[in-house]
Image: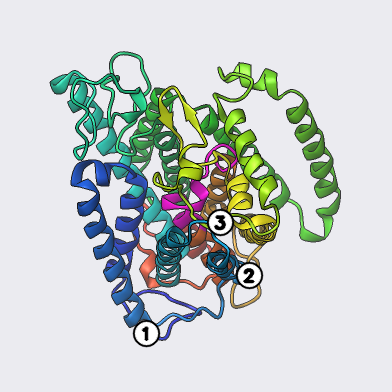
Amino acid sequence: MTNTWPLARGAVPEREAFAFGATVLFVVFAGDAVPNTLTWFGAAALWALAAVWGITITVRAKPTIARTPRALWIFLGWCLVSVVWSHWWAATLASMAAQVLCALVAFVIASTLTWRRILDAVSLAMRWVLMLSLLFEAAVAVFVRHPIAPIWTHYGDRDIPDAFYFSRAELFTGGRIQGLPGNANLLAMVALLAAIAVAIQLAEGRMRRNQSIGWLVVAAAVFVLTRSSTVIVAAAVVAVVFLLAVWIRRVPTERRTPRYLLLTGVAVVIVVAGVLGRGAIAGVLGKSSDFTGRGEIWTKVLGLIDVHPVLGWGWIGYWWPDVSTLADLAHRKGVTYLQAHDAYLDVWMQTGLIGLLLFAIYVVTTLYRSWACATRVGFDAGLRPRPFDPVSLLPLLVVVALLVQSFAESRLLYQGNWILFALIAIKSRIVLVGEEPVSVGDGPRTPPAKREFRWAATR
């Protein structure tokens, strides 16, 4: 049975809870592969089945929301209230239904899986997306040998933008591959998340060394083939945060203040330098000074914000193509972009300054708890300090990766990024990694030569 401490009021088979978590993460991070292969009707049916599965697990596990982040529910409540003044009220109601359902899915996973099993689920889902993406791109490049469009489209002989294709058959031509997500930037983020999860599993002894190295090579290969500037920056920031978290943890809590002051000063300098030198940074990353048209989109979104700065235009999440105010806002090279390419500008435009403040509280408190997971020293039942568990780095590194991407993409507000971020927000509010009791559901899933976790071997 699952370890639902401290929310346990029912029971669900651990294997079922894990299967649900891994399946949901795979489906949402596979992205456009679902509608592109099943049509939107098939995709809706698949998503509905996943939702029903999650509801049945909720009914049996009976978790309580008492120890979940209020900031998340308050923000969602404000988004729902925005229907009162929404300029697209029907879209607001429909989007809110999807938004709340995704949050509840994250709640179910967080309430029925331990941190180690969440690590396993994230790793399994991301590895499957990577593997199938490479197989898909290889099949298109070898057998089809020309770009292919989603199954539900029919463009005929028209000349269409490259962004409209599901795959551009560029695996062996030096172009950027898109994989199952149908977008190089999104596939690159999957590669980064897979690398984080596999590296932690290797450090935890939850995956064989050769297997781990193999998957890290695959993730690195996909990372190179996608060449996403945003994810390159995210990977660099993740590496720096990892070093800082380890550096801080090596010092007792009562002696950390000088290091925090030093980090604050360095962070201020880096932010100022980044703002002043953003043009040069864009050049190094191979981007134009407006970050490949994002500057133009941000300017137009700021124009909408100026009209309704306090309450916003109404929640919509991912922009609906039939809402003319948004669909006619951002065009580039024949492509209509249906997002602000910045989660915070998107939230401000849709829910106003009040919604932006509530969202910021949700993000900052989640980041704070993730930092606490990585740096706080846990204690066992005898009040003895517990050894460092590599899995304690999972929340922090994943949250940092998603937040860096959120400055160039609005994905944090919907689909896989929304669910994964909400999952960590809820789970870190339920229990920090270092304070979670031992669970039978955690293993053993280590190599044959080592059947005990590090903390178990030192008890």
Query: Is tag 3's residue or tag 1's residue first in the polypeptide sequence?
Result: 1
Q: Earlier in the sequence, mark 3 or mark 2?
A: 2
| Quadrant holding the N terminus | bottom left
**Kind of residue sitting beneath label 1:** Gly
Q: Residues within 10 Å of mark 3 (few under 14, many from 20)?
A: many
Query: Judging from the image, what secondary structure is the residue with disc 1 in?
Result: loop
Q: Nearer the viewer, residue 255 or 124?
A: 124
Q: Which mark is residue 10?
A: 1
Boundaries of the magenta span: 405-421
Q: Residue at x 61, y 17 (%)?
A: 284
CA separation in Å, label 1 and label 2: 27 Å
Give the label on residue 379, or none. 2
x and y percent of residue 296 in the render?
60, 29
Q: Which residue is disc 3 drawn over?
A: 392
**Which image quarter: residue 304?**
top right
The residue at 66%/62% (across/down) is: 358
Looking at the image, is mark 3 or mark 2 nearer the viewer?
3
Identify residue type, mark 2: Phe
Q: Nearer the viewer, residue 340 or 428?
A: 340
Q: Residue 297 at what x, y percent from top left?
A: 57, 33
